[in-house]
Image: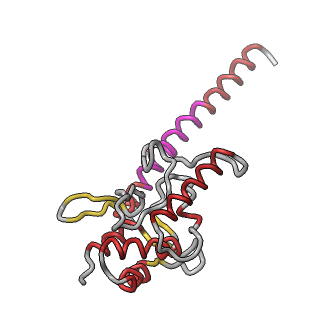
Amino acid sequence: MTAKDLRDNTLRHLGIACTFTIVTVVMLGLVYPFVMTVLAQLFFPSQANGAIVYRNGQAIGSDIVGQLWTKPRYFHGRPSAAGNGYDPTATSGTSLGPTSKKLMDATKATIVALEKDNPDAVGPVPMDLVTSSASGIDPDISPQAAYYQAPRVAAARHVPLSAVDAIVAASVQPRELGFLGEPRVNVLQLNLALDGMKM
């Protein structure tokens, strides 16, 4: 192979590599995101825009992003390890392993606090009220976690427990397509339903 053949071969391969790079950048960096954005806006506009919940024209939260609830009259979500807590710009779990002393101590302290805040609760503390999710901004809790908190919420609102239990039951969302995931309760929607309760 002559020096000219080697140069021509190198230039041909370099041309192919440059062409491939340009095509993939355009297709995967511009065309694909544009198509996905258009499809999301057409078929899932609420979710694509953050599933923001408005009341009286003011944004009060999101159906897909958990937020901190501290008042006794409201249901509380899962603990959060995202940033300083419930930070959607720094989503993360604790990254602590099951043998971590820090995780065990935090779990024990959370259980003690939950038992103190929910003295009339029946049964053991549901694990999703003790452990943070992988994202740290999970908007949902299990039905068991909602029923566990119901006596506290009912007492704080001075309403019958049966009325709060009925709202929880009406707020339970089933598995997706009947088999994906677990039944769950969206904390924001549950608390909004409580605020709209007529007694």
Residue stretch in magenta:
18-36
37 left or right of 58? right
Q: Would residue 122 be visible to someone looking at this image?
A: yes
Residue 113 picture location, percent across and down: 50, 58
164 left or right of 58? right
Residue 132 picture location, percent across and down: 55, 55
Residue 67 picture location, percent across and down: 39, 56
Please state which of residues 179 and 154 is positioned toward the viewer in this rendering.
154
Residue 54: image quadrant is bottom left
Residue 149 picture location, percent across and down: 45, 71
23 versus 71 height, above or below? above
Residue 50: image quadrant is bottom left
- Which residue is most to the top? 3
Please state which of residues 39 and 159 is positioned toward the viewer in this rendering.
159
Give yes or no for residue 61 being in the magenta stretch. no
- Which residue is most to the left? 56
- The residue positioned 42% from the left and 58% from the top of the image is 66
Q: Would residue 43 be visible to someone looking at this image?
A: no
53 versus 183 height, above or below? above
62 left or right of 79? left
- Which colour style is shown? secondary structure
191 versus 92 height, above or below? below
Magenta stretch: helix, strand or loop mostly: helix
**Number of numbered callouts drawn:** 0
- The residue positioned 63% from the left and 48% from the top of the image is 103
Please state which of residues 187 and 11 is positioned toward the viewer in this rendering.
187
- The residue positioned 53% from the left and 35% from the top of the image is 22
Residue 101: image quadrant is top right
168 versus 74 height, above or below? below
